Image: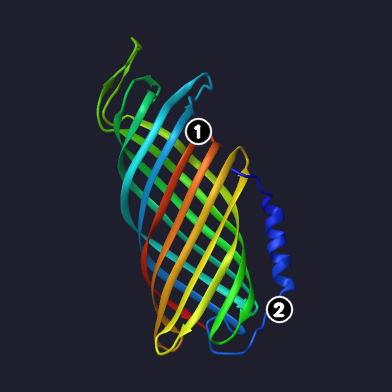
Amino acid sequence: MRSANPVFLLRAALAAALLLPACAIPGGAAWSDLHASAFGSVIAAGMDASGRDITVNDSSGGGFDFEGDLDVSRNTEVAAYYGARVGFAPFELSIAQFGYDGSNDGDVTGATRFAGVPISGDLSISSELDLSVTKLMIGVDLLNTPAARIAVLAGIDFVEFDRFDLIAREARASSGGGSGSVAIGDVQTILEGESAPVPMIGLRGDVRVPFLGRIGAEVTGLEADFDDADILYVDFDIAAHWEPWDNVEIMLGYRAIMMDVEGTVGDANFDIDLNVNGPYLGLSVYW
């Protein structure tokens, strides 16, 4: 991946936005003048992942607990997705949070070790992933009218891996005359208690739809070096807002987070693709 300086990119995005004209016209839209909004929703978050050349150091640092590749099939879990916005046009601050906590079936392929035991070939596993993402963004409107707005965004996604475990679903004797064996239920930890603030830049757009409400979307991301890993990160959110009563909206949307991480995080070294996405339904109020 190409290297990037996140701090430079964030400063450049904000400087560019401030140099462009932001037309803050008074109006009754959710982004007009001094404004605030909050939403709560339920998201059906699906997760799938694949990893290549994964190695995990053992607790003594003298070798590896795990070596192999990983494929995890998609599974969907229901979670809360909520957030808030506050601003005085053309500026806006937003925060949103959601997570995934679930189990997925999958396979370890081309493995040479699992939970410290030498093995060969494939092994059926289930994965336990507890992941949360908190998004904090600053927006500066390039266009702000009662009918539509376009904004440039800069901020972070704070990604927390509370745990990412692999659990054996079949027994396997040690290969090559080694000691021990893999039993059903043996756990191999890939990540535990790891977190990272991922800097991002992007765009947001909202447009009012006559007699219905509005449609809003934002896309943010970054490709950069972070600590000892290269990260390609994209965060996409789109929602239709129907306004049955003044200042109250019913939301139907879709959120997607796509990560490609190559390098070292904690005790693990890997090249892994991880996707969390799904539709959501909720309620929003604005002032």
Position in image of residue 49 (x %, y %): 39, 44
How far apart are labels 1 and 2 at the CA level? 46 Å
- In this picture, is 145 found above or below 231? below
Q: Secondary structure at mark 2?
A: loop
Give left or right: position of 138 versus 217: right
- In this picture, is 272 found above or below 44? above
Q: Nearer the viewer, mark 1 or mark 2?
A: 2
Q: Crowding near pointer 2: few (<14 within 10 Å), some, many (20+)? A: few
Give left or right: position of 1 versus 239: right
Q: Earlier in the sequence, mark 1 or mark 2?
A: 2
Amino acid type shown at disc 2: Pro
* Residue on which disc 2 sits: 21
Q: Secondary structure at mark 1?
A: strand
Q: Crowding near pointer 1: few (<14 within 10 Å), some, many (20+)? A: some
Q: Looking at the image, do the residues carrying marks 1 and 2 touch, with CB atoms under 8 Å apart?
A: no
Position in image of residue 109 (x %, y %): 35, 30
Amino acid type shown at disc 1: Ala
Q: Nearer the viewer, residue 273 or 65?
A: 273
Q: Quadrant of residue 105?
A: top left
Q: Nearer the viewer, residue 206 or 179?
A: 206
The circle drawn on residue 268 is 1
- In this picture, is 283 found above or below 270? below
Dividing the image into 4 quarters, which one contains the N terminus? top right
Give the number of callouts.
Answer: 2
- Which residue, as the protein is rendered here, is positioned at the far front? 2
Position in image of residue 44 (x %, y %): 34, 60
Q: Residue at x 31, y 28 (%)?
A: 122
- In this picture, is 34 found above or below 267? below
The circle drawn on residue 212 is none
